[in-house]
Image (spheres, coloured by chain):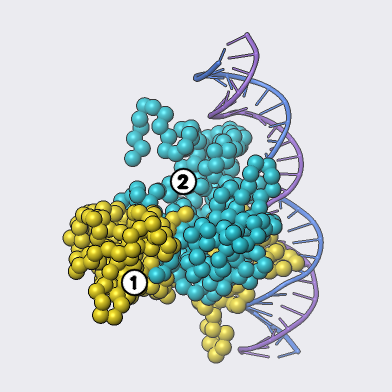
Chain colours: A cyan, B yellow, C purple, D blue
Amino acid sequence: MDTCSPKQVNTMKDLTTRQQEILTFIEHYEWRNGYWPSIREIQEKFNFKSTNAVMGHLRALERKEVIERIPGQARTFRINRPDAPEMNEIPEDATEVVDIPVMGDIAAGYPDRVEPAGEIGRLQVDIASAGYSSRRRSFALQVRGDSMVDAEIYEGDMVVIEPRDPHDGDIVAALIDGETTLKRYMKKGNEPPYLKAENKFYPELYPINELTVQGVAKAVVRSL
Amino acid sequence: MDTCSPKQVNTMKDLTTRQQEILTFIEHYEWRNGYWPSIREIQEKFNFKSTNAVMGHLRALERKEVIERIPGQARTFRINRPDAPEMNEIPEDATEVVDIPVMGDIAAGYPDRVEPAGEIGRLQVDIASAGYSSRRRSFALQVRGDSMVDAEIYEGDMVVIEPRDPHDGDIVAALIDGETTLKRYMKKGNEPPYLKAENKFYPELYPINELTVQGVAKAVVRSL
DNA sequence: TGTTTAGGTGAACAAGTGTCCATTGTCAAG
DNA sequence: CTTGACAATGGACACTTGTTCACCTAAACA
């Protein structure tokens, strides 16, 4: 796909060739090893004399929102792949399928406290059709409550959730009053974020803390 | 070696309950976060007062060849799952899964006359979650138009269609004016059946003949 | 000509993190 | 009773690793 065109045509966004190389290495490393590289491993791969060379590129990638990192913690990358194709442009290899556990009884806790046996089923959605970006981590929830009817999500729907930090406008799975419900995540500028129900009969605002948001909704599946 | 105790039946191999818990946590953590936990994060999760409690269990898991680790390196796990399903294949405990072609340009003809090459993608939904009843010949459609907004089905949604005779109240894929749209199939008693758009701005009734109805909608999938 | 941006060097620090030692306790098997 | 596997405490050490500060080069830009 990406042939070496003379122009500075980057695969995604406005990544520099170097930045793209770094990103590719990180992705490949994880693919091969199952865990992420350390800064110094990246340094070594590119024969940098200083770890700060790597740091600079990572900072750039973070600024361009291509990757996410947990400050101070080793080997913790997250890659934001905007390669989730639009509905109409499903690639040829779209048969790639992800197996998603349906966490039915999630209300009492967080996903990582839910026993695997707690699944009420499994949902299989191919990457393209569900807007899947990372093949791990995601799970599905069955919607309880009517807090999102104004966003056309109804009780009983299955929502594919990808655990990641939300951005303004995302629909998120939020733990409120011990129950996981869907809310719209709103964050304007430097103001504190808040959650908003898409139902005119619900209170507009909800309190939010670090533990509230469990993930971002990527797709809806409804049985008729 | 093998102490054939009558009880203590562990999920896999001969893992202790505690070891199984640790393993499960590690797997869950990675599945949720995309990277592996540190020793101290495991310690914290289980309220151990010492990291060495974790070390003991990890050593045991390594000895039993359930996990692998790279000595001295942070957050580098490998999990040997003898039952690990391939990325694309469906685990045994999953409900039956159907592979559905997404027929994008279906308006001009009937589903069974459409070439497989006409697919714009594939959708994989398991039977339970999509209310799938028959695995034959089903296909998916991307909704164009707003004829079903009052039934909470919107433009861009993917609808799983099962070709069969409709019953009263079913949502059907109907060929009207050379385009496939969704309509509600109505048949009361001995009266002739008719189709009804679930949009108050559309005409209520549509003509119907044998060839009009292409199938019955079984599920909706929507990307967010 | 000064300024910005990308890319990089070098060195040092501090927090994150894996590892190890010595000890305690429980419980089932021999 | 002894032995060994399992479980856990407590503290300490040293390597791994992310981070930062100061400084450099080159190209692009206005």
Name the residue that disc number 1 marks: B170
Depth order, front residue of C15/B170: B170
Q: Does residue A1 lie above or below D21 as drawn?
A: below
What is the chain letter for disc 2? A
Q: At label 1, which amino acid type do we have? A: Asp
Is residue A153 left or right of A201 when viewed as pictured?
Answer: left
Please provide percent x and percent y for residue B49.
75, 67
Q: At 41% from the left edge and 57% from the top edge, which residue is drawn?
A: B154
A61 to the left or right of B100: right
- B178 vs A92, nearest the viewer: B178
Q: Is residue B151 above or below residue A34?
A: below
Q: Neighbour class for label 1 at 10 Å: few (<14), some, many (≥20)?
A: some
Q: Position of residue B125 (x, y in %)?
A: 38, 66
The chain holding disc 1 is B
Please indicate, yes or no, whether residue B66 appears anywhere in the rendered image: no
Where residue B33 sits in the image (x, y, percent)? 57, 57
State whether discs 1 and 2 lie on one chain: no
Task: Tell whether A3 sits left or right of B117.
Answer: right
Residue at image point 35% right, 30% down = A5
Residue matched to label 2: A82
**Dot 1 lies on which element?**
loop
User: As rendered, which of B146 and A184 lies closer to the eye?
Assistant: B146
Q: Quadrant of the C terminus of chain A?
A: bottom left
Contact (Cβ within 8 Å) of mark 1 with mark 2: no
The numbered disc on residue B223 is none
Q: Residue at x 40, y 32 (%)?
A: A9
Residue at the image point whose x is 42% and y is 29% from the top? A8
Name the amino acid type tagged 2.
Answer: Pro
Query: Callout 2 environment at 10 Å: few (<14), some (14 to 19), or many (20+)?
Result: few
